[in-house]
Image: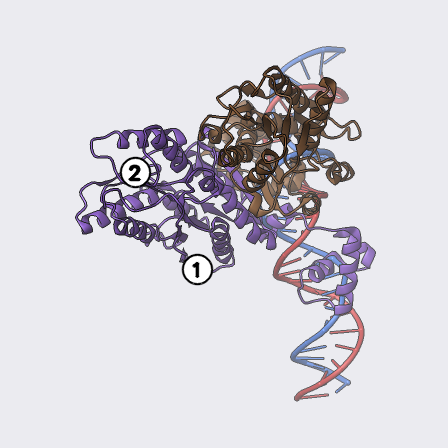
Chain colours: A purple, B brown, C blue, D red
Amino acid sequence: MKDIARHAGVSQSAVSFALNGRSGVSEETRERVRQVAEELGWRPSTAARALSGEGAATVGFVLARRAETLGVDSFFLQLVSGIQEVLAERHLGLLFQVVEDVADECAVYRRWWAEHRVDGVLVVDPRTADPRPDLLDELGLPAVVIGGAPDERHPGLSTVWADDAGAMASVVDGLYTLGHRRIVHIAGLPGLAHTERRIRTLRAEAGRRGLAEVRSVTTDYSDAEGAAVTRRVLEGPTPPTALIYDNDVMAVAGVAAAAELGFSVPADVSVVSWEDSALCRMVKPWLSALSRDSGEFGRTAARELTALLDGGSARAVRVPVPRLVERGSTGVARGA
Amino acid sequence: MKDIARHAGVSQSAVSFALNGRSGVSEETRERVRQVAEELGWRPSTAARALSGEGAATVGFVLARRAETLGVDSFFLQLVSGIQEVLAERHLGLLFQVVEDVADECAVYRRWWAEHRVDGVLVVDPRTADPRPDLLDELGLPAVVIGGAPDERHPGLSTVWADDAGAMASVVDGLYTLGHRRIVHIAGLPGLAHTERRIRTLRAEAGRRGLAEVRSVTTDYSDAEGAAVTRRVLEGPTPPTALIYDNDVMAVAGVAAAAELGFSVPADVSVVSWEDSALCRMVKPWLSALSRDSGEFGRTAARELTALLDGGSARAVRVPVPRLVERGSTGVARGA
DNA sequence: TTTAGTGACTAATGCGCATTAGGTTGACGC
DNA sequence: GCGTCAACCTAATGCGCATTAGTCACTAAA
């Protein structure tokens, strides 16, 4: 800016005014300064900006997963891609970190906030007993929780969520209509808010219809556990006629496991995947799946965060209920 | 720091000396200052640090992919996870951005460097005619190219690379030994350095052995193109007896397509995937695949970058040649 | 003619840290 | 008794920007 000032024959303050659209300079001078800045290829130093009270112009995103479980998963990359799209428009950076567990994640938030590294964060994988909302409240760190149900105990946090309960209800309804009475839900990680929400809903729906042989089994989302659980439930005395998998990886692994045991899909057992991706079209038959727009999910979350950074108040936004794409893996229950 | 100085009864400079391990304070004072800093939960402001010449303590990573092609891909998340591991130890942040194309990527580098947002960058997906090395040289932005062959025209850039040529040679050798003479390589994006390297090597190996019916076909890495190309080559007059896929997604899609056409694997056609992941164990038979440690790849790259930031000179590091994991998808060529 | 007001600008300050230039004390050698 | 040096500490400066407090000239109102 010193250079610009010299070249344009004005003071540094004038340059600052001109470039930031503040009053105090004539239109003529402003334009001249802009020209010079352009010629010199000037860009404001984020460090200096941050230091003089403008914030870090950066948003944080922490993924708490062990490296091994960072496997085949299209969701996060798509989510991040959507987030980026919105942040990039505003020239906000995305600081990304992978950690082992939620405790580490909390430590990262503390550090980032203390170091003034970020202006806000996006939180994923909310849990039933989650220390993060309390921490974020305590720190006063602006945040958007992605995937959690609205939580009135933390009025400072925004929430972007999908109606898992509604989706689960519609899936169960669809299976029930096809004659399915014995359903196993091969769920994801226990403790994750949406896992528990789906499990609760399934139980409620089963209760409402008087279905005794409906249950959920939690896993670690891996193909290995997906296959193992599938094998276990199909080898039982009264195997289920429908399986609901919490992600595509397990669904595909489960179909393979079922085939090995001599179960054909969908004749013997129907399969629904809670995640839609190319994977679902790589097995025979193609998998019926709940499809959602992960990119849009990310965009919505990022927009909420920018609104928060602009001084808006927190709120809960619901994205559209995932839509069930019927493919070849669901059919009328055997004997129905 | 002002607070710390007051609480400890010393000057701000003394606090700075104490906390940064510089001489000029007694061991006793240093310890006292440390205590106070600890109690107050002090963390240096990265902005202020950056402003006083310490750099941004941040590394940049840009992924130039259209959102649609950010599909099922375990490689990048694992790579990033490995990168993080090393960066986290040094408290370096990772600034992450997804853009449409290489031109945008270049713009991001320019902006980041001008804004002093990053101290260095990690570059992925090097291409045959790549504008990025020249740009990085011009800017003087420390960088590590991941996956490119060493390039003596850019002595300022470090390179971390795998020996694709060697791997391809060994795969071809293995297939040749099994009696395969007609081989099709279903490659990734044309223009990517490693795609071209693999194609060149395949051609050379074929020439050396006098194999006329060996060729490469480029794709966009998607399951759709993988399947389409597979169908096309298998429906030809003299279908290949072995297929080499540049990633796991295409390999799996290809196996499905082959099955539809009545080709059984490996009896009619052998299949090798250049990427190993859970996917390769989700189809029957399990896919033989070239396995590499993507996390370690990332760690190595990050270490090279930190070395560069510490003032080390650029160099080219080769990570171990991917190892072929023989599973059920490769066998003796029909008629051999 | 004086006063208040306004538009266009400059000077000065501070953000939080690192660093360099000083300052004070006490020990040591001559 | 004086100069020298080392150890320990304080004061002052600058990084690049935003912002607040002036300064100056010129115009409209009293």
Quarter of the image that includes the C terminus of chain B: top right
Q: Residue at x 61, y 15 (%)?
A: B177
Q: Which is in the foreground here, disc 1 or disc 2?
A: 2
Query: Label 1 is found on which chain of the structure?
Result: A
Camera sees residue B308: no
Q: Is residue A15 placed above or below A107 in the rendered structure?
A: below
Name the residue tied to disc 2.
Answer: A268
Residue type at numbered disc 1: Ser
Q: Position of residue B198 (x, y in %)?
A: 68, 27
- B33 displayed left or right of D11: left
Quarter of the rendering containing residue A25: bottom right
Quarter of the rendering containing residue A333: top left
Q: Position of residue B8 (x, y in %)?
A: 50, 34
Query: Foreground residue, A247 or B320?
Result: A247
Residue type at numbered disc 2: Asp
Query: Foreground residue, B189 or A139?
Result: B189
Q: Residue at x 21, y 34 (%)?
A: A238
Q: Position of residue A125 (x, y in %)?
A: 40, 42
Mark 1 closeness class: few <14, some 14–19, many ≥20 residues within 10 Å = few
Q: Residue at x 49, y 36 (%)?
A: B260
Q: Residue at x 77, y 55 (%)?
A: A38
Q: Position of residue A257 (x, y in %)?
A: 36, 30
Query: Foreground residue, B279 or A187?
Result: B279
Element marked by disc 1: loop
Q: Is residue B205 placed above or below A317 in the rendered structure?
A: above
Q: Which mark is residue A313?
A: 1
Q: CA distance from mark 1 to mark 2?
A: 51 Å
